Image (cartoon, rainbow, N blue to C red):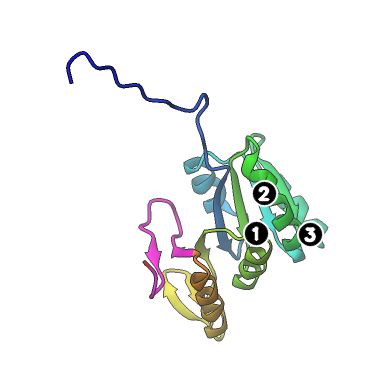
């Protein structure tokens, strides 16, 4: 319409997803995560949520050495990670959450009900069936993923950001 001004309101500052990604990757921190995911998502904080790593000082030191100076590393057990995540949602960081197993994802979801889960690396071991590339799952893990899906979690397979997200059967 001529002469009519339309005003748009925008937030005074850009709004970002402070928790950029929650990812299952049994290798946790490795080159693919550091070189591709952190850059693509502009991550400046990685939260490793794993009970075993908390208890292993050597693993903690190696992970810390792998961090570039601009990326903060937090290592917490699953319960503490679930307690930290609500405050991370509102801070100024862009956080990548890494967990090692499907069982850990279920445990994390019980304490912090997330809405999306990237399955990026679960290696082949006896009893697991290949799902796609180097992602495999046992029948028990598939059952746990289905439980999460039934709770409304969008579960997808994606090794690197340039891969198309692949849904597990039965998902939108």
CA gap between label 2 and label 3 equals: 20 Å
Badge 2 crowding class, 10 Å Cα cut-off, few under 14, some 14 to 19, many 20 or more, is few
User: Which residue is depicted at the point 60% across and 45% down?
Assistant: 95
Q: Position of residue 22 (x, y in %)?
A: 56, 56
In this rendering, which labeled residue sits more in front, label 1 or label 3? 1
Q: Which residue is mark 1?
A: 112
Badge 3 crowding class, 10 Å Cα cut-off, few under 14, some 14 to 19, many 20 or more, is some
Decide: is 153 above or below 37.
below
CA gap between label 1 and label 3 equals: 19 Å
Q: Position of residue 128 (x, y in %)?
A: 52, 82
Residue 160 placement, left or right of 57: left
- The span shown in magenta is 154-171
User: In the current view of this chain or complex, which residue is farthest to the top?
Assistant: 3
Q: Which residue is mark 3?
A: 54
Q: Position of residue 4 (x, y in %)?
A: 24, 17
Name the element at disc 1.
loop
Picture disc at residue 86:
2
């Amino acid at each position: 319409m001529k002469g009519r001004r339309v005003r748009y309101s925008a937030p005074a500052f850009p709004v970002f997803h402070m928790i950029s990604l929650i990812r299952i990757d049994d290798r946790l921190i490795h080159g693919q995560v550091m070189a591709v995911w952190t850059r693509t998502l502009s991550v400046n904080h990685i939260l490793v949520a794993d009970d075993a790593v908390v208890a292993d000082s050597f693993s903690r030191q190696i992970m810390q050495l792998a961090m570039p100076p601009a990326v903060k590393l937090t290592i917490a057990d699953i319960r503490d990670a679930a307690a930290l995540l609500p405050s991370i949602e509102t801070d100024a960081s862009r956080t990548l959450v890494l967990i090692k197993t499907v069982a850990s994802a279920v445990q994390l979801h019980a304490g912090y009900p997330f809405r999306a889960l990237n399955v990026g690396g679960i290696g082949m071991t006896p009893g697991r069936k290949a799902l796609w590339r180097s992602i495999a799952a046992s029948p028990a893990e598939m059952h746990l993923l289905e439980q999460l899906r039934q709770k409304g979690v969008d579960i997808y397979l994606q090794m690197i950001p340039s891969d198309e997200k692949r849904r597990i059967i039965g998902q939108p």
